[in-house]
Amino acid sequence: MYFKKFSLMLCIILISTFFTIHSVSASSNFEDISSKHEAYEEINYLIKLGVIKGYTEKGKTYYKPNNKVTRGQVAKMVVIASGNKPLTVKKSSFSDVTVGTELSGYVERAIQLGYFATNTKDQFSPNKPLTRDEMSYVLSKAFKLDTSQYEKNDSPFVDVKTTHPYKQYINTIYYNGITKGSGQKYNPNDQVSRAQFALFVARAKNDKYRLDLPIKEVVVPDNSAIIGTIQVTTDGLNIRKSKDSSTIDNIVGKVNKGSKLAVYAIEGDWLKVSSNGGYAYVYKTYAQFLDMDGKTLGNAKKQVTTTQNINLYLEPTSTSNVISTINSKVKLPVYNTVSGYYLTVVNGLPGYIVADSTEDVVVEKPSIPDPKPTPDPTPTPDPTPPSVSGDILGRVTVDNLNIRKEANSTSTIVDKVKKGEYVQVNSVNGYWAQVTYKGQNGYVHKSYIKLLNQNGNPLKDRIIIIDPGHGGNDPGTVVGTIAEKNVVLKVSTLVTQKLEAAGANVLMTRTGDTYPTREGRVDFTHTNYGEIFVSIHANYADNTAAQGTETYYAKTPGDVYEEDIDLATFVNNQIVKNVNMKDRRVREMKYIVIANTNIPAILVELGFLSNSEDRAKLTDDQYVELFAESIYKGIVEYYSKQ
């Protein structure tokens, strides 16, 4: 009897011990997982489901949360978590998975159920760590998440391109509260740790553990929100997922010169466009807006001032989209007139305004202040008032200028004119002006006369070359993400618009991110019969305290450098005064682009990108406008000086 009682007690102890041991293996009492661990509850939940186990070493149990989870481990976990059993096969589907093993059963079932994407070379790679993009596919398939509604949606992550093969699965687990990524990145190629995968599986299996669901973005572009159309001005322009040019991870495509894109917003230096069915961004420096007929804007015909607060419309009708509202007394260029509406540009964006809500701007001659350059060079004094008449006069800028019988350099000389004298200009054809001097008609090379309008508009029909420095593979000075080539193109474009609105014929050596050679810029100027040349740059110095504006001219044999000095002085003074820049004055330097031109030519260094104060101005739209306005006013002053 005693023996029977002893045997019964021993049996109870053994059974009790068995369940105690089982209880330990099915608890979250891991040596390396405390109750404060972020995955504590999820790991405990999955252990109770039999999805995961720990590692027993020297009588202690570990989870090893930082170890990378392998494809073989994942196959077993998702098969169990999705309520399925291992699949027994007679022949393994993979050369690296042995038939008859526990691993084989789970891998074969996972493949049969479509939990893994197609593998290559008959290998499953069971010991290879799972990547985050693979994880999105596995979880979407294993837990039957609806991926169809995210197939055409753009990814919320900047490092998941529109063409990424797992994009819709990454979107699916994001919008289902399974992952939130890291900041704006998903890091699709990163490997997944055991702790991370426990979190993801628990969230996919049970809504209790899911993150707060993000609001699904409306990423399909709405055509009713289009504010304009652009044409790309350079080859290989990057289309980016976000407004960040410091990384290649957000590039979702490229477009070449001439491509057209719909624009939905202007956001600083970026244009929000549509690409591959979603929103994306391109840098606006490398694009130009088109009018409603798909044509470039051309030259401004005049300038107007708004007489009241008015709307800027996408099309010339009040029923079209309102792009923005314009305050009263704002000056705007006019490029065309359509059915009572003016085509104009506001903050770089073309649109239409009601013509009756504006009045024309009359271009007046400004008062001419005395230029104040450094003691050397000395500006030329005001000339004696002309004794000849006509709509256009030419003030001679060299001594003994030949007047020839015909428009070529070998023709008979019929007279000579002294420096400072005036001729009546009857017509201009290329570089030759047909003139009248003391009743004698003939031709002079227009490079040696300053053409002066006498009809109240000093800029009308003057041919002005604006040269944005650098470009293309030559960024110029670069500070952080700020490149000189972009800054000066923005200023140059505004200067051009202002000059065109005042009646000038303006040509830019580049209008996009291209690189004309220095010699090419000179050739461009001569080919287009330029009358003055203004090259625009930003400066740099190793000493970050260096700041201010300086303007250069080149004194070369036979050059009419006094005109260069006048032009440089007027422009430099305007910038210093209006933008409140330190005056580094007018200086002589034989830069190729100004030394090799046969017309008045200057090179303006707006300010130093290496100096924080100057840089802040050069990258601020309001100051950029002031730089442009100052160059414009300097040119007006130059042509107003008779």
Image (cartoon, helix red, strand yellow):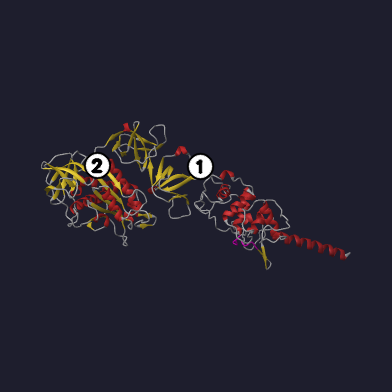
Majority secondary structure of magenta residues? loop
As for residue 505 lying within the magenta part, the answer is no
**Residue lying at 69% horizontally and 55% vertically, measured from the top left:** 108
Badge count? 2
Q: Which residues are magenta?
A: 62-68
Pointer 2 or 1: first along the chain: 1
Can I make out residue 623 in this image? no
For mark 2, what is the residue?
461
Please identify the quarter of the rendering in which residue 345 is found: top left
Tell me the number on the disc at residue 369: none
Looking at the rendering, in which quadrant would you find the N terminus? bottom right
Name the residue type under label 1.
Val
Secondary structure state at the residue bearing disc 2: loop
Pick the front one: 446 or 532: 446
**Left or right: 72, with 507 as reference point:** right
**Residue lying at 13% horizontally and 45% vertically, measured from the top left:** 422
Q: Position of residue 486 (x, y in %)?
A: 36, 52
Frontmost of labels 2 and 1 is 2
Can I make out residue 389 in this image? yes
Looking at the rendering, in which quadrant would you find the C terminus? top left
Q: Position of residue 622 (x, y in %)?
A: 33, 47
For mark 1, what is the residue?
220
Name the residue type under label 2.
Asp
As for residue 67 lying within the magenta part, the answer is yes
Instruction: Please rate how many residues cluster around mark 1, counting C-alpha atoms within 10 Å: few if below 14, some from 14 to 19, many from 20.
Output: some
Q: Position of residue 352 (x, y in %)?
A: 36, 36
Secondary structure state at the residue bearing disc 1: loop
Pick the front one: 40 or 504: 504
**Residue lying at 45% horizontally and 39% vertically, measured from the top left:** 225
Instruction: Please rate how many residues cluster around mark 2, counting C-alpha atoms within 10 Å: few if below 14, some from 14 to 19, many from 20.
Output: some
